[in-house]
Every structure is written in C-alpha cells, then in structure tokens.
Amino acid sequence: MHIMRVMKRYSQLALMLCFLCLEIVCLCKSDGSICRELERKALVDFKQGLKDPNGFLSSWIGLDCCSWSGVRCHNHTGHIVRIDLQYSFMLIGEIQPLLVLNHLRYLDLSGNFFEDDRIPAYLGSLVSLQYLNLSHANLSGRVPHQLGNLSRLRYLDLSSNSLYVNSLHVIGSHWLTNLSSLQYLNLDFVNHSKATNVLKVLSTLPLISEIHLHDCELHIPLSLGAHINFTNLQFLDLSSNSGINSTVPLWLFQLSGLEYLDLSDNNFQDLIPHAIGKLTSLRVLTLEYNEVPSIRLPPTLGELCNLSILTLSGNNYIPSDLNGLGEIFSGCIKNSLEELYWSGAKLTGQLPIWLAKLKSLKTLDLSFNSLYGSFIQFRLPSMQELSLGGNQLNGTILKYLGQLFPKLVKLDLSYNNLAGILTEAHFDNLTNLESLDMNSNAFELILRPKWVPPLELKYLDMSDSKLGPKFPSWLQKLKKVSYIKMSNARIMDALPVWFWNFSSNIENVDLSHNEIRGKLPAGSAKLTNLEILDLSHNNLEGQLPQFSSNLVDLDQAHGLFSTSTFSNTSIIVPSLFQLYIYSNKIMGSIPKTLCTLSYLAVLDLSHNMIEGVVPDCWNLSLYSWLGVMDLSHNNLFGIIPASISSTNLYFLDLSNNAFFGELPASFKNCTSLYVLDLGYNNICGSIPTWLAENSKYDLEMLELRNNMLTGSIPPQLVNLIYLHVIDVSNNHLSGAIPHSFGNFSAMKTGMGVPSISVGGYRSNIEINLKGRDVQLEWLSEILICIDLSNNMLSGEIPEELGQLSLLQSLNLSKNQLSGQLSEKIGQLRWLEVLDLSVNNLSGVIPPTMTNLTSLNHLNLSYNNFYGEIPYGGQLQVLPDPSIYNGNQGLCGYPLDKKCEITAPAQPPSLPNNEDDDNNLETIWFYLSMSLGFIFGFWVISGALILKKRWSMPTI
Ligand SMILES: *[C@@H]1O[C@H](CO)[C@@H](O)[C@H](O)[C@H]1NC(C)=O
Ligand SMILES: *[C@@H]1O[C@H](CO)[C@@H](O)[C@H](O)[C@H]1NC(C)=O
Ligand SMILES: *[C@@H]1O[C@H](CO)[C@@H](O)[C@H](O)[C@H]1NC(C)=O
Ligand SMILES: *[C@@H]1O[C@H](CO)[C@@H](O)[C@H](O)[C@H]1NC(C)=O
C-alpha cells in the first residue's frame, strides 16, 4: 500500500519531469527574439537567490534570456512573458523583486521549495499576470492581500502548501474582490478559518468557473444574499470543510451550470434535498463520508439526465434495502450513469434487479455493505469494474461470466460466503479481465494444468479457495501478472523450478499457508520487479535464490533467511528506493554498497542479527532521498558514523545496539529530524547543546534512554518547539533540571503533536515492554512526556514545569532532587503518570494535587514528605498506600496512620545517615517487588518507537 503510494508519487514526479523536458525542448526551439537587458538582469538576480541542485538553470547564461529554459519572450516586443519553473526542485531563497518584469503573464514556481516560506507580497505588482501557480511549494503564513491587485489573473493556484504546521492562511476575503478576470481558483488546504464571506465574494466574480476549496476550514454559509451570480461556475469542490451539524446550503442548488460538485466529508445533515433535481448539468456528484445518521435519496436524483459519476460511499441510507430504490434509478439517470460508488453504506437486501436497467454502467462498487443472497444473474453489457467484496453473498456463481459481463476488467468477490465448484467455463471469454479477487470465499477450482486463463490478468487472488493439491501450472501462462495471492489454497506440492522465472512483471507473491514442500529450487531468479514474497507457513527448506532485482520489501519473509547473511541476499540494485527487511534473521554486516544507492529513501533493517560496524560511507548530500533509517535491534557497534547526516533525514533509529562514543557533531546538519532514537546503546559524553541551537529543528521525539551520558541537561533543549517526548532516563546526568523546561511549546500548546498520523505516514506506536513488542493503540494518546528518571539530577524541581499544561507523563524518579514540591503541579490537568519516587523531596504534598483529574499512576515513595496527604479528587481513587511508602511523616488516607486534627504538620526527624546504605537496599528490594507500579510506568515511559511503514513527506 505504502509502496504503491510512494511509487505512485515517484511516477508522478517522473511524469512531471518528462513534461518538463518536453517543455524545455519546445522552448529551445522557440523564436529568436533577444531579451531586454533590464529583464535579463532581473532574471540573473533571481537566479542568485536560488539553489539549483539539479542544474535546471544551467542554460541561464549568456545574453539571450529568451532562450533560457523555462523563459519565453514576446515574439515582437521581446519582453519576458512567461516563466515556468514547475517542479525543478529548486530552493528559492530571498527573491529580488521581479518588478521590472511587468509584462510577465505566466509564472509557475510550483513544486519548488521556498526557503522563506512566505508568499512574496511583491507578486501583487506584476500586474500583467494572468497565470500564477505557487502550489506544492512549502509556503505558509498569510496570503498577501496584494495578490488582489492582479486584476488580469485568470488562473490562481496556491494549493497544497505546508499541510502540517502553521498552514498557509487567508485573512479576510476582501482581497478576492478585484480578481475580476479569475476563472480558476485552487486554494485546497489553505486555511480559511479567519475569512468569512469567501464564497460570497467569489460569487461576484463574473468569469469564475472552477473553484477548489478542499480542506480549508471554510465556513460554508447558508445564504449568499439575494443575488447569486455564479453564472459560469462549472466545478465546485467544498469537501472536507466539516463544521459541526452543518446544513447543506440551498443556494448550491441554484447553480444550474454546475457540472462537478463535491460535498464529501462535511458533517452535512440532510444531505440530498429535493432541489438536487435542479442541477441538470451535473455530471459528477460526490457526497461520500458525511457523518449523518441517515439519508434519504430524493426521487429527483433520478432526473439528473447527465449524471455519469455518483459517489455515495460511507454514509447511511434510508431505505437501506437497495430494492426500494428502483424508482429513482428508473429515471433518466439510468441512461447516463457510468460509475456508481456506494461502499460502506450499510446497504442491505439482495442485489437489485434494477441494476440491469443501467445500460451504461461501467463501474459498480457496492463493497463492504450487508448485501446477501446470490450473485448477479443478469447481463450488464457495459460493466467493466464490479466490486462486491465484503458482503454476505452466498450460493454459487453462474457459469459463463464472460457472457454476463462481456467487458469485465475487474471482478472483486472477496470476503463473501460464495461457494461451489468453478471450472474453466466460468472464465471463458473474459478476454479483458485484469483483476480477479476471490479471496475468502469457499470455492473449489477444478482447472486442467493446460487451461488457458484470462491472459490479461495482472492481479489474481484465490486465497482460501481449494486450488491444490497440484501447484497450478497454468500460472506460467500469465505473463502479465504482477500480483499473485494463493494463500491457504491447499497446495501440497513442490515449488516448480519455473516459478523463479516465469514472469518479470511479478511484484507481489503470497503462497503462505499451504503445504508447499521441499527445497527451494536453486538458480537465479528473473523476478526482476519482485517486492513482496511471502512463502511462510509451508514446509520449505534452503535459501532464496539470487535475485537480480529490486527486492525491496521482504518484511513478509519472516524466518526464511535462517541461514542468510546480508551480503548474499543480492538486494543491491542501484535504483533501489525502499529497503525493508526488518524482522528477519539477517546476519553478517552492512555492506558498503548500501551507501551507493542514491535513490534510497527508506532503509529499515531493524530487528535482525546484523553485526559489526556501520560503514562510514554515506554520501547524504543535501539532495539525497534518504528520510528514514532504522537499524535498531541489531548487534551493531562502534562509533555512530559521522556520514549519517543529512538535512532530509527525518527518522533515525539506532536504538538497541551497542554503539559507543559521542554523538557525531555532523548530526548538526540533520535539521529535519523529528524522531531521534539512540536508546539502549553505550553512548557517552554530554547531551550536545547544538541539538537545540537552531530552533528550526523539527525534533519531536528525543530518545536517549539507557546510555552513558554525563554532564547536565542543556537548557537550550527548550528551543525545540515541537519536542513532546524527552526520554533521557537511565544515564549518568547530573546538575539541576533547567528552569527553561517549563517552556516547551509543544507541551503547552500541543502544536505539532501527532494524534495518529504524522506528516503523511501513519505510524504505529510500538512499545518495548520488557523485551516484547506490544502494540498498544491507546498509547498514541500518551505522547507528551518527560522522563529524566534514574540519573543523578539534584536541586529542586522547577516550579515552571507546572506550565506544561498538556504534559501526560512526568517521571523524575531515582534522582537526588530535593526541596519542596510546588503547588503549581496542580496545573497539570492532563497528567496521567507522575513518578517522583526515590528522591530527597520534602515538605507537604501540595493540596493542589487533588486537581490532577487524569492521574492514573502516582508514586511519591521514598522521599521526605510529611503532613496530611491531600484528600479528594483523583487522589481518592489511588488507594494503594505503597505509593507513599518511605515518607515517615505522612498521614491520612490511604495510609493507616491518622492525622492529628489540630497539630500542624511537622517535619519528621531526619533519617540517620549511617542507615542510608541499608535504606537504599530496602528501597531497591521494595521497588523490584512493586511490579504493579513498574508495569504502569513502563507502559507509559518505556521506549516509544514510532515506526514501520513510511512514505516520503510531501514536497
Ligand atoms: C510567437 O511564436 C510562436 C512560435 O514561433 C508562435 O506559436 C506564436 O503564435 C507567435 N506569437 C505571436 C504573437 O506572433
Ligand atoms: C452577474 O454577472 C453578469 C456578468 O456575467 C453581470 O452582467 C450581472 O450584472 C451580474 N449580476 C449581479 C447581480 O451581480
Ligand atoms: C446535531 O443535531 C442533532 C439533531 O439535529 C442534535 O441532536 C445534536 O445535539 C446536534 N449536535 C451538536 C453538536 O450540535
Ligand atoms: C443464503 O443465505 C440465506 C440467509 O441469508 C439463506 O436463507 C439461504 O438458504 C442461503 N443460500 C444458500 C444457497 O446457501
């Protein structure tokens, strides 16, 4: 899935590059007009402000700027009219205003990276601009109102900038009023929470025909006033602007010219009013994922005679029985509808006969509903993609599918209760079939070895059908197949030799859970595109062959490598993009050749038995792709190589190895890191201050647990404004806890703290619980914590910690902290875990502790607290007296010792110094006994490891 996503993106990039090349070729051939000197100088200045790693601007030399790549001049006047630098991967720094280019009509800087992430206001002075594209360009901050001066602008695209932090936003809507030539506007992901009336202003722009406002925190007004003048509007995307309980505004249904309407993912209540029938031009209507209790489809929907694509997935409908909707689909929609998406909508009933009326229907997706009864028994002559997976269809399927669906390309029957014997006749004449998914049914297939399967098949999943006992030799004929799943198919045979060679298109093979036996055939494999190979749960022996390929994802091959060493798995091909071979039994050391993979974006070798020193040959230039490096849980040792340092690396996990020495100073260059996990090594020296010198660092999680760090904790860490996990426990740190620790922005505001998804990838939070990896989903909610336990920290606990209002876990146990506990501790409303045990804290327990309403785990044992334990609030439901053990002067609930009502709290006599050692032993004994507590504190503060699957961050 992720690979798919990354590859998809990769190919998009490739496509854009191609497009770019074509563009350049055209431009080079363009006319011979000589540019004007003033304008040429402006371009030269502009170039000075750029970093151009790919040499895109290498042609920007000489006098004739009209022949420079991406630049075009007017044939007659010689003025520069067009600059197109789309996706040239440049870093655009400070731009000298291009003011002299006042004939510029077309400016495309999309897909580059603005270093100063504001939109330059001077763009508003380029009054001739007709086309401005600044999408995908790392822009944030306020959209300058000066853009409103561009009265000739026809096309404006500011979409998909800074999706995560400090997003690009609009204040007010007035700036739009003068864009009177605007036809196309794309503000997807531009925050509009501080702009009202945007739609109202847009409705006055006479020429506007296409508006994209996806995920803008837009307020969608119920009224646009008396006159609605969206005369030319054809395309409107208002998806993902969910207000609470919003109502579909009726003015939408006066837009009679509308051809495309997307209202998905808003919390609209009564989603489809009768008035929908007025939108007679509609061709595409998308209404998925509105969290509405129930929706009724109005009969007028059937009167949309041009509607060809209708998406209703992910909502609940009344009546939920599909058969009740026959009347709607008898309207003229029956002639126009080509694609109907209606999955996950709690639909029930049998597959309705009215489907047969939809003569143009090419795509039907009714997956993940509760449809029952038999499979379609009527002819659907146009049907190409039929998805019925995840229902309760039962019985058999008719023979001659090729006659029922002569144009079928994709058939998904997975996860139903279909059964019966399928023979060759079922698949006759499916000459276009590319994808067949019959996973999780109870079919039995009776097919001759000589059978000729549908030859276009690319995706074939026959898992859980009875295919065996022979290995299906007809597979050899599927030369185009890239995905084969035949898990649990009762194959009891040897893996044939041809299997390694029969198609170079194969990407993904799953033959797990069969009884395939014997030695893996020897020889080399020509599966040059293989990404995933799962042969687990069979009776195979021996080694994988030499793959001459991009074997990029072997995480499914657990256990297969019992005898493999790293170097003979032959995964090293220059174009390798992602390498996942975690959780195998890879031995040997990391080969130097890995350093040479210039496209490598993800390297995950974690949880293997790789040993030795990591080669210090990484050539991670500014433009390397490597974002994720996970070498954790191996047997690596030595000094961390200085060459692992790149501005693009965002996840680095070297934990659970035996690295020693200090942190290399070159890590200063890792300005994009947001997870740094070096826990469980032997790293020494102090926590470097440079880690925090530059407040632009994105670091969110700093894990240095269980090392040999010394010195004090640098107060500068507070400059890491996104930091929300600090774990430096179990080191030899000394000195005081910095007062600055009360100022961690992310712990005060939650800014940048992920809920579940972080920066474009979904993370599984894993926790290392006494050597076992346990996945605890709820843990994703405990992500703001400080663990400084088991060091030699002294001094008082800074009262400023009380300002970290979102802190969820604070562990300062096993240090030498002294002084009193500030009553400001009571401000930590979200604190779930507080462990201050085994310190020298004294004084009374502040009564404000009863305000800690989220507290689940508290340990104040082995300090010198005295006086009455505050009663009430959450403290009342922590009845375990041992959490106060070893504080001689405490009294009150839950201790047995009652407080004397009037006597003021007295400090207890100090313990006899001579007994200290003894005391300590008792303490340790006690601690190892109190497993209940330790469990609690491990769960929270044990090594948090964010990991597993990655995709690249969006540019
Ligand atoms: C300028 O030249 C190009 C290509 O030579 C041509 O396509 C275009 O029509 C010309 N424009 C004018 C305004 O003459
Ligand atoms: C609506 O736009 C048209 C031009 O498309 C213009 O002539 C008309 O005056 C506008 N009406 C209102 C009420 O703004
Ligand atoms: C949303 O509307 C429903 C019914 O109209 C109501 O019961 C519910 O309380 C509302 N919720 C909010 C958050 O306003
Ligand atoms: C299919 O399931 C229905 C109940 O949902 C049952 O009445 C019917 O007998 C089943 N048909 C077959 C062929 O198993």
Image (tube, rainbow, N blue to C red):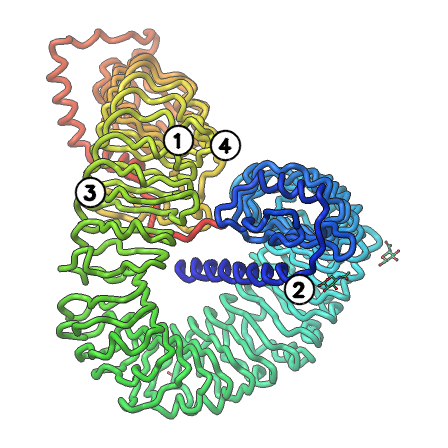
Find ligand 1 in the image and state its quadrant: bottom right
**Image coordinates for residue 544, horizontal then vertical, percent:** 19, 66
Label 4: which secondary element? helix
Residue drawn at the location 29% of the way across and 14% of the way down: 818
Q: Is residue 845 left or right of 23 when viewed as pictured?
A: left
**Image coordinates for residue 450, horizontal then vertical, percent:** 29, 91
Q: Which of marks 4 and 2 is in front?
A: 4
For label 3, the crowd category at 10 Å Cα-Cα, with few meaning under 14, some 14 to 19 and many 20 or more, is some
| Residue at mark 2 | 272
The yes-or-no answer for disc 1 within 8 Å of ligand 3 is no
Kind of residue at disc 1: Leu
- Which circle marks residue 572 in the picture? none
Task: Answer whether residue 476 is visible to the viewer in this image.
Answer: yes
Kind of residue at disc 4: Thr
Does label 3 or label 1 sit earlier along the sequence? 3
Q: Are marks 2 and 1 in contact (CB under 8 Å)?
A: no
Q: Do the residues labelled 2 and 3 touch (CB within 8 Å)?
A: no
**Image coordinates for residue 843, horizontal then vertical, percent:** 32, 12
Residue drawn at the location 64% of the way across and 74% of the way down: 308
Q: Do the residues labelled 4 and 2 touch (CB within 8 Å)?
A: no
Does label 2 or label 1 sit earlier along the sequence? 2
How many dots with numbers?
Answer: 4
Report how far apart the C-alphas of labels 4 and 2 lie in the structure.
Answer: 39 Å
